[in-house]
Image: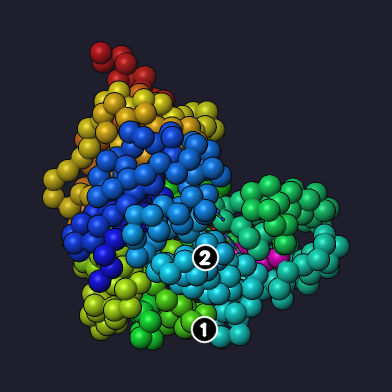
């Protein structure tokens, strides 16, 4: 096994990795920015070091500082978590060049899949269905327009380097293509420093279905079933669950096989996620592969009982996976709600602040992954994910009821969160029936927020 792992991340995912390491007897080195001196990850690791100022570019994205810290503390591996350097192929290469193991696939594999347009071509060549669209990147708006005529509107313009729903624009007709192309490309340049664009037909009323993959250096590639992440706002996930109500056993098997095929075609190693959109008619299309541990990985951990982070560490150490495809059994149902420090009443404006009081839910079948504590000041420099609340139960309805009561126990004081909205989603009849697609939140948001306001008014009247 590994001896000492540097965790190039912060927040709940840094804690998640520290926990897995401790249980395996692996030492941890946490790195923190000047804004994170009092952050939990800096306290809970075996050792911790400051790597620079608050700005991510000066700390969590500072490759030189992170590599020096790993070498100076005698680490044998670096775990990148998600976000920050997690999908940076040059960083993965530099780790290996410095004699460190990188917990994730090789730089070459990350490079191949990191360009979403190239990944699409790779999947297509492997026989995995992709959304009708461009063969590789499009050069300019004019070429995009010609292609859009062929595949038919509406279409999606997407940045090859995109992520987190950015660099993407829907185009409903030829008249608006040029303007949307400019916008999407400018956003891609601003966010990712890369303006390469490609085009896909917009699949109407789809589900977002993704498969968790684990692969080792011995050539085993397995999937751990799906997650349905269709509850999204601006193409960012809010609620995830497994299994998906939209899959039959036959479709699950077919999609799982396609996910494994895509991973094998890329020579994949480690934990990864193959994302698909699933049309109402049952047709599914590859959209991208994320080459890292995913925010929503605990959903899969709850239903399979497999610790994905420990498996990542095993694979990085050169050990085979501890299980085979036949060993993967899905038990019960799991749901995750992402709790963000943001104000739904102000267009989900991030609202960092001091956590004046915190009470976390517990009891049977509840898991909370968070780096919050009472008194903790959420810094404004990083993303607004504050906690992940998960419920696991024998059936979906029991998991929903469990999630409702978990969210009722949760108290976060000091700044607004989207927890009340998550609670209302758990009561929405269409959600409860499992009848929803990626448009659910957009269509229901105003109604749900009005409901939240009514609840607030009634409660104020009571007191
Ligand atoms: P998921 O939630 O499926 O794991 P997200 O796209 O929401 O994936 O991203 C997870 C984390 O990674 C978020 O913190 C997000 O801000 C960050 N992230 C996603 N894509 C990028 C990127 N290209 N560059 C930097 N950070 C990213
Ligand atoms: P990112 O890299 O930002 O995660 P994705 O390509 O995974 O981008 O797309 C983000 C979301 O956009 C998906 O989860 C899905 O809801 C939606 N989406 C992506 N491609 C399509 C498509 N061709 N048709 C319909 N919806 C799509
Ligand atoms: Mg995606």
Picture residue at 33% right of the left edge, 33% below the top: 38
Residue at left offset 70%, top offset 57%? 194
Q: Is residue 439 left or right of residue 22?
A: right
Q: Residue furthest right?
A: 142
* Position of 81 relative to 370 (above/below): below
Tell me which segment is drawn in magenta. Answer: 198-203
Q: Is residue 89 above or below residue 380?
A: below
Quick one: label 2, few (<14), some, or many (20+) residues within 10 Å?
some
Task: First in sequence, mark 2 or 1: give its number.
Answer: 2
- Residue 326 vertical position relative to residue 343 in the rendered view, above or below: below
The residue lying toward the viewer, choosing from 169 and 16, is 16
Q: How is the image coloured?
A: rainbow
Q: Is mark 1 within 8 Å of ligand 2?
A: no
Image quadrant containing the N terminus: bottom left
Residue 32 visible to an observer of this rendering: yes
Q: Which residue is mark 1?
A: 265
Residue 455 located within the stretch drawn in magenta? no
Residue 259 x, y percent position in the rendering? 45, 77
For the point 49% across and 28% down, the residue is 345
SS at badge 1: helix
The answer to the question of whether label 2 and label 1 lie on touching residues, with beta carbons closer than 8 A, is no
Query: Which dot, 2 or 1, sits closer to the camera?
Result: 2
Frontmost residue, 42 versus 232: 42
Quadrant containing the C terminus in the rendered view: top left
Q: Which mark is residue 94?
A: 2
Percent across and percent down for residue 272 are 43, 69
Q: How many labels sit on residues?
A: 2
At a point 45% along the width and 44% down the height, the residue shown is 51
Q: Residue furthest front?
A: 72
């Amino acid at each position: 096994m590994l001896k000492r792992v540097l965790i190039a991340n912060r927040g709940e995912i840094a804690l998640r990795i520290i926990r897995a390491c401790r249980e395996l007897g692996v030492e941890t080195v946490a790195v923190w920015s000047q804004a994170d001196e009092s952050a939990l990850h800096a306290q809970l690791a075996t050792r911790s070091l400051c790597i620079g100022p608050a700005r991510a570019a000066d700390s969590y994205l500072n490759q030189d500082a992170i590599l020096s810290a790993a070498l100076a503390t005698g680490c044998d591996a670096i775990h990148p978590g998600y976000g920050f350097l997690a999908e940076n192929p040059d960083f993965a290469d530099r780790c290996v060049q410095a004699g460190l193991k990188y917990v994730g696939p090789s730089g070459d594999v990350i490079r191949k899949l990191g360009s979403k347009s190239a990944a699409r071509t790779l999947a297509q060549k492997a026989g995995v269905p992709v959304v009708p669209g461009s063969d590789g990147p499009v050069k300019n708006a004019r070429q995009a327009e010609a292609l859009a005529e062929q595949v038919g509107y509406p279409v999606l313009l997407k940045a090859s380097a995109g992520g987190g729903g950015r660099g993407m624009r829907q185009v409903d007709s030829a008249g608006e293509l040029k303007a949307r192309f400019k916008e999407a490309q400018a956003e891609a340049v601003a966010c990712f420093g890369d303006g390469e664009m490609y085009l896909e037909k917009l699949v109407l009323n789809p589900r977002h279905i993704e498969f968790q993959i684990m692969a080792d250096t011995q050539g085993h590639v397995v999937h751990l079933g799906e997650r349905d992440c269709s509850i999204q706002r601006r193409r960012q996930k809010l609620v995830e669950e497994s299994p998906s109500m939209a899959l039959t056993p036959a479709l699950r098997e077919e999609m799982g096989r396609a996910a494994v095929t895509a991973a094998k075609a890329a020579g994949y190693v480690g934990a990864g996620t193959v994302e698909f959109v699933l049309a109402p008619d049952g047709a599914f299309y590859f959209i991208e592969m994320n080459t890292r541990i995913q925010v929503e990985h605990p959903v899969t951990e709850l239903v399979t009982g497999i610790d994905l982070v420990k498996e990542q560490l095993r694979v990085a150490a050169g050990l085979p996976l501890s299980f085979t495809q036949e060993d993967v059994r899905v038990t019960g149902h799991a749901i995750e709600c992402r709790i963000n420090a943001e104000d739904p009443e102000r267009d989900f404006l991030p609202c960092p602040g001091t956590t004046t009081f915190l009470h976390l839910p517990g009891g049977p079948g509840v898991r909370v992954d968070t780096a919050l504590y009472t008194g903790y000041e959420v810094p404004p420099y990083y993303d607004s994910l504050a906690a992940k609340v998960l419920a696991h139960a024998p059936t979906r309805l029991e998991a929903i009821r469990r999630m409702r009561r978990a969210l009722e126990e949760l108290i976060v004081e000091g700044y607004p969160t989207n927890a009340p909205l998550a609670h209302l989603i758990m009561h929405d009849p269409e959600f409860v029936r499992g009848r929803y697609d990626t448009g659910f939140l957009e269509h229901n948001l105003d109604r749900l927020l009005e409901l939240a306001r009514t609840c607030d008014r009634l409660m104020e009247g009571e007191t």
